[in-house]
Structure formats: structure tokens, C-alpha cells
Amino acid sequence: MRPGDRALLLALLAPLAAAGRVAAQAPADVTGRVVSAETGAPIAAAEVAELGGNARALTDSLGRFTMRRVAATARLRVRRLGFAVREVGPRDATDVRLDPLPISLDAVVVSAARREQRLKDAVPEIAILSRRDIAQSGASDAAGALVQATGVQLEGGVPAGAGVYLQGMGSQRVLILLDGQPVVGRLNGNFDLSRLPASAIERIEVVRGPQSTLYGSAAMGGVVNIITRGPTRAARASVDMTGGTQGRRELSASASGTRGDVGVALDAGVRGEALAPGIAGDDDTFARRWNAAPSLRWSLRPGTVLRASALAVGESQRYRTGQLFRFSDNTQLAGQVSLAWQEGARQFTPTLSFSRFDHLSRAGTGTAPVSDSGQRDRQDVVQLELTGSAPFAGALADAGLVLRRDAIAADRVAGVARVLDGLEGYAQGTWSVAGVSLVPGVRVSSSAQWGTAVTPRLAAMMRPLPELAVRASIGTAYRAPDFKELYLDFVNAAAGYAVAGNPSLRPERSTSTSLGVEWVGGSYFGRVSAFDSRFRDFIDFGPPDAGGTYTYRNVGRGTTRGVEWEAGWAAGRSRLEVGYAFLDAFDDDTGSPLLGRARHTGHLAASTSFDRVQVGATLQLTGRAAIARGSAGAITEWRPALTRLGLRTTVRLAPAVSLRLGVDNALDQSIGPSWPGFTGRRVFAGLSWESRGASRE
């Protein structure tokens, strides 16, 4: 080609090339999908925004989004609560993978101040077990999920079930809430958390340390608030089946969705296993449970929401002690309705809640109980609670008034039926200036039976850096004597002793201090805290009288103190978490350790995923603990240490179908019947299906 011809050709093609460059840079529609880098699951309600522009979109329930007229050179910021923020170009937006954070400071919690607030604004330290954490644990109930939290130890056995220790305080002194409201159902002072199904739980919030200022009696060690699954914006349905060794059989199903202003949800299931808490074997033993949990959310008008929820659990257990079979039939019911009004920083919520527990205990020489036999124990609580928040004197003030009635009808209670009425009021304020939050509060509780308890608390948090928080608190707490301690009337003629309640009992009281430091970066976190609790007027048996009758008395003084630390790291599809707790719990009068509490506990959890497969492992260590004391006060028996290794694998067979395989206690460790949960090796497999649709609003 002659030079003149080449120049002519270039001149003719130049406008076309320029037009092509302009077309490539012209605004165009962008369609993409946002998923979790760890699991590959779609992320709904993720925000995709054009930096420096006006284009913005939210992902649907399948993680999909479309943005109109986005420049080819634009940068898109993708963010969702609980995930690290990511920036991509339009060409990379077809498949955006977000890394999950080990802790999201923007997560919403409700247990710290009895209202919704961001985790980073909560002055007390809160541990959150999310729906994801519960699902990955493979646990079938709340007790199995809770042992993942640092410093949580199991307590109990048959027929009391599996309760928890928090900061050395036993289950009697740890308040269990269901959606923020009290539930009854304690046997021998212990609430069996294995009755509550994991399938119905959205998350668990654990607040360590005394919380009587906000929650009243039994919160000396802390609060475990179990939040059930409520209505979702997008339609959702799921079915989950699990089977395993020791007779484990589970089937659960759920459905949820919102249309217009009304959202409804229902979770239901059945569970069974050839085990009972505290029985280290499966010979002629079983525990069978069913559950149903409906809920409703109705937006009456902007700022006003009606909520209603309920939980029903039925349970039958059989186990052998000596030559006799024991039978336990329980019904757990709980329900509440609330009307929440909010306008700016002002809010007011009246809540009416009810809880009932019906327990029938029987025995027999065969595998079926003797008809029309046994002892009944029915517990009820009805509570009307009025709570509100509003700006006041430069602070955000929280206050509440509680009217409560507890009732019991039991064969071993003097007079069979008893009722206790109580009136309580609390107030606290949050002053925040230059990164420092100060929260003083007080509660006054009154009962015609045991008198008045005043429980003040002062908590503070300082954030010198956005990632760094320093927390400190000093506060008091109390536990009111329960019906059995006040009115028990039990005679064991064969053994030659009797137990009698004491209507003159005073509440147990404690004073606690704590100090903690927390650092939460983008992909890692670390926290360490120390606590010291001194309790007095501990309710226990005094020496028997001449006739062999034991009577409850305010006799004990003790101390629980310790250090807890934990750290976590997440990068891409991998996560690592580690925690350790040291506990020193002893009787002040004798110096001997309190029974059932291990000095050392720890856990390690690691997981990673690739393609459609996710694998994980957990290692839990529970040190030895004193479990029996002689007449002179010396320890006569120790429970040995226990190390449990759990392995998990999840395979996504299809976008809506997953297969789970796992083994609990892979090392087959066993420490005998003194442990509240079965400790032999357990293998299981599960298949789940979940369908999500578009929101209908």
C-alpha cells in the first residue's frame, strides 16, 4: 500500500475508532449478583452504589441487582451488614463476593438497653451467636449452640436438663429470656435449654455480668436472650432433615413472608434421640420433642408496629436409674404481644407476655409408667411491661414499669398452689460525649413475700478509636427465693429425712465489677475482660434439726472472679476463632471451690470453603471440676477434664439444596453421668432445602 493510500485509510478509520471509544465509555446498564465469599449463598438487601454518582440498587432475595446507565469507568461500592465493603468496576460486578466479618459492629442488638441499638453503641459486652453460627454448629437445641460462646459451661442432669454457668454463676442465677420476656420451666432451679429447638432460633444474645438493673431477679451472672425467627420481607420456605447415631432423628420446616403491611412466619418440627441429659448411655432411654413457633408483624402505620409470637414445645423422656425407669413429660408454652411506637428518638412499647411449664414425673419397673401415678409441677408467669426511651437532660433515658404474677401448683409445695405478685420499675440514662458513654441506672423491685430490692449499676465505655472500646462497670444484682425454697414440703420416709421451705428467706445479693478491652478491625477482632463478683445471703440448706428436717436458709458467701479472652480472624472464605476463660469460684467461709465449675475452659473453631464445599472443625476444652464435698467441707470427688472435637462438612448440591455431614466428640471422650450432656461420639447427616422468593409489598 502506497503511503498516500495508508494515510487516507487511517483518516477514514479514525472517526470510527473514536466512536468506538465513546461507545465503550458511554453509560450502560449493569446487572450482577452478590454472594458470600465463604458459602456462595446469595446476599439479599446488599447496597450497590456508584461512587460520586447517583446510581444505586439493592439486591433481591437471590442476590441479584440491576443499575441503570452506569459509566464504564465508574467504581461501584458494595456493602452489607456483617460483610467487608468491596469496590468493583462494572465489568467485575457480574459476580461480587463479599467477605464475612468475624464481628459486625453495625449489627443490631436488643439486650443491652432493652431497645434496638448497634453493637458498637452497647455499653455492656455482648456475645452474639448468629443464625449462621447456630447452623454451622450442627446443634439441635439452644444448649448445644451456647457452648460455642467463651466462658459458657453446662450445668444440670436428669430431670433438670442442660443449663449454663456464666462467670461462675449457675443456672439459677442466669436469666433466660425468650424474645426479651421471661420464661418459666426450672426443675431443681435449672432451666433446660435443650428443650428449645435450634431450628426456631434467629440468634442468641449473651450479656455477661449482673443485669438486675434492667431485668430484675436471677440475672446475677448475666442474661441469655433467645431471639426466635420472625417474618422475613422476601417469601421463604425451608425443610431440614437430620439423622444420626444414638437415635438422632429431626425434621423441621418453616415458612415466612410479607405482603403489604403484614408479615407472618411459622417454624415447626419434631426431634428424637435415644439419650437423656446426664445419662451416659442409650439403653432403653429416649427424649422426644415437638415444637411450633408462629409469629406476626403488622405495620399499622409509619412508626407503629404490632408484634405477636408464641412457642410451644412438648417433651417426653424415659431413662433408667437403678432398677427403676423414670418418665418425664413436659409442656413448655410461651407467648407475647407488643405494640411498638417510635418517632425519632422517642419510643414506647407495652408488652404482655405469658409462660407456662407443665411437668409430670413418674416411675415404674417396666418401660411404661404406672397409670394415674406421679407428681405434677405446673409453673406460670404473666407479665405486663411498659418500656420507653426519650431524650432527657442531654441523655437518652430508658425506663420501664413491670407488673408480674408468678404462680405454681405442685405436689411438693405446702398448700399445693401459691402465687407471688411483684411490682418493679427501672430507669437508666446514656450520656455520650467525645467518644465516652456513661450509663447510670437503678431498679426497685417489691414483693409482699420477700420485701424490696434496690439494684443500682454504673457502666461506662470509651472509644478513643473507632476500632477500640474500653468498658468498665460496677453493679449489684439479686435473686429472689423461688417457690420451692419458700414453700417446699418434701418427706423421704425411706431415707429418713425431710426438706422444708422457709417463707422468711431474703433475696441473694451480689456486687460485681468488670473491665474489658475490645479491638475490632476489618477482618479480625480481639477482646479481653476481667470480672470480680462477691455474693452473699446465698440460699442453701442449713444443718438438719433433731427430727432430720433440712430447711433452706440464707447461709452462704462466695466469690467468682476470672479472665476471659477471645480473638477471631476472617479472610475470604476462611475463618478462625479462639477463646479461653479462667474462673476462680470459691466459698468465702471455707475457701473451697464451688461445685460444678471448671477453672479452665477454651475453644478453637476453624472453617473454610471452596467451590460448593465448606468444611469446619471445633475443639472445646472443659477442665476438671469439683462435684462433691464431704461433711467437713473438703472436696471428695472431681469430674475429669473433657476435650471434644467436632468436624463438619456442608456441600451445596444445588442452589437451594445442601447436604451436611458431621461428627460430634470425634475422639469419643466420656466422663460419666456427672456431665449434663451425653459425651460419646455422635455421627450425623442432614439434608436441607430452602427456597426464597421476591418480597411482596
Image (cartoon, rainbow, N blue to C red):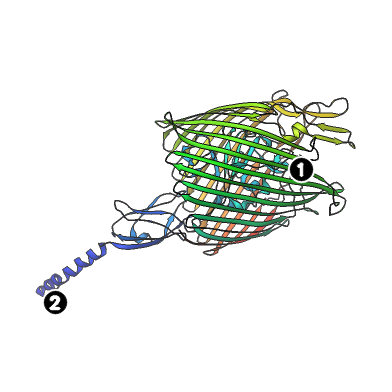
Residue 103 point in image, percent of width and height: 49, 44
* Residue where numbered disc 2 is placed: 1
Q: Amino acid at mark 2?
A: Met
Residue 614 higher or lower than 17, as above or below: above
The reply to whether residue 481 is visible in this rendering is yes
Residue 438 point in image, percent of width and height: 47, 29
Residue closer to the observer: 102 or 449: 449
Residue 242 higher or lower than 212, as above or below: below
Residue extending furthest toward the front: 300
Residue closer to the observer: 461 or 58: 58
Residue 689 higher or lower than 177, as above or below: below
The disc, 2 or 1, on the residue closer to the chain's N-terminal end is: 2
For the residue labelled by badge 1, is the local secondary structure a helix, a strand or a loop?
strand
Residue 681 marker: none
Residue closer to the observer: 298 or 466: 298
Q: Tell me the CA gap for discs 2 and 1.
A: 104 Å
Q: Amino acid at mark 1?
A: Asp
Question: Depth-wise, is mark 2 or mark 1 nearer the camera?
Answer: 1
* Residue where numbered disc 1 is placed: 377
For the residue labelled by badge 2, is the local secondary structure a helix, a strand or a loop?
loop
Residue 210 point in image, percent of width and height: 59, 32
Q: Is residue 601 left or right of residue 515?
A: right
Residue 7 higher or lower than 442, as above or below: below
Residue 220 point in image, percent of width and height: 63, 32
Q: Which image quarter is the N terminus in?
A: bottom left
